[in-house]
Amino acid sequence: QSVLTQPPSASGTPGQRVTISCSGSSSNIGSDTVNWYQQLPGTAPKLLIYDNSQRPSGVPDRFSGSKSGTSASLAISGLQSEDEADYYCATWDGSLNGYVFGAGTKVTVL
Amino acid sequence: EVQLVESGGGLVQPGGSLRLSCAASGFSLSGYWMSWVRQAPGKGLEWVANIKGDGSEKYYVDSVKGRFTISRDNAKNSLYLQMNSLRAEDTAVYYCARGVITDQWGQGTLVTVSS
């Protein structure tokens, strides 16, 4: 059981906006920045958002991240079929002295 | 182009050992923390360990402490994970990744612990 809580699934139709939440505590999200990863089927994960809201080069601006207190969220606007993937939030946990991932959210494009 | 290539995975019996390697190219390993992350079949991502650029700091997830050792050879631009006393629950694809925030990932190597 992860210390970061994500919904197991989310869905939307093409063009819609989908939001994924990530809830933690003062020892993790509350005290460090949040990163998000996208894992397409059968591939290695890819860094999607770092430092709460920054996009690495090449990541479309349809993807955005935010953080407030002990929660963070990832938004996908203008949903596309190629966005079907698993999405994970992660951050450092000062109590565990380790990097922790959420359990992941499977996004389905209807 | 940054590349990370893992090797050393395979089938091992419970209680056995395995050493994973990760060859880095396209950047100098010495300037980065490096991490190992694993993913059990059909499951989510689990951080395993990371190591500072000069090797002076290492951190491990509780479930592998005392059994796994992360190390690096900056001269060879390589990262390692020595895994001892392997258990069935260690079965997973093991990824090496650059940095604490893991901004670059390898393709992974599968470790199967089974009799």
Image: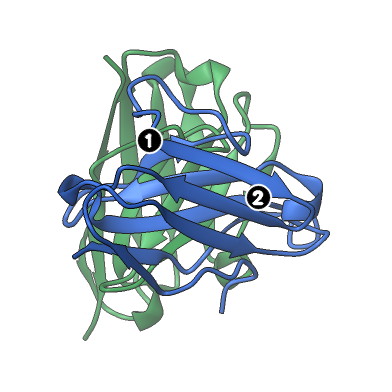
Chain colours: A blue, B green
Secondary structure state at the residue bearing disc 2: strand
Which amino acid does the dot numbered 1 rest on? Answer: Arg
Mark yes or no: residue B87 visible. no
The residue wearing badge 2 is B59
**Quadrant location, the N terminus of chain A:** bottom right
Instruction: Give me the residue at 24% from left, 71% from top.
Output: B112
Q: Residues within 10 Å of mark 1 (few under 14, many from 20)?
A: few
Q: Quadrant of residue A21?
A: bottom right
Spot occupied by residue B109 in the image (x, y as percentages of width and height): 23, 52
Mark yes or no: residue B54 visible. yes
Q: How many marks?
A: 2
Distance between mark 2 and mark 1 Cα atoms? 34 Å
Q: Is residue A58 above or below residue A32?
A: above
Secondary structure state at the residue bearing disc 1: loop
Q: Residues within 10 Å of mark 2 (few under 14, many from 20)?
A: some
Instruction: Give me the residue at 16% from left, 50% from top.
Output: A81
Let me know if marks 2 and 1 both belong to one chain. no
Which mark is on residue A62?
A: 1
Which mark is on residue A74?
A: none
Spot occupied by residue A6 in the image (x, y as percentages of width and height): 52, 68
Which amino acid does the dot numbered 2 rest on? Answer: Tyr
Which mark is nearer the camera, 2 or 1? 1
Name the residue nearer the viewer: A94 or B31.
A94
In this picture, residue A91 sits left or right of residue B79: right
In this picture, residue B42 sits left or right of residue A64: left
Name the residue nearer the viewer: B44 or B31.
B44
Q: Quadrant of residue B45?
A: bottom left
Instruction: Give me the residue at 34% from left, 29% from top.
Output: A60
Spot occupied by residue A61 in the image (x, y as percentages of width and height): 40, 29
Work out which residue is located at the far bottom of the displayed protein and give it.
B115
Spot occupied by residue B28 in the image (x, y as percentages of width and height): 44, 13
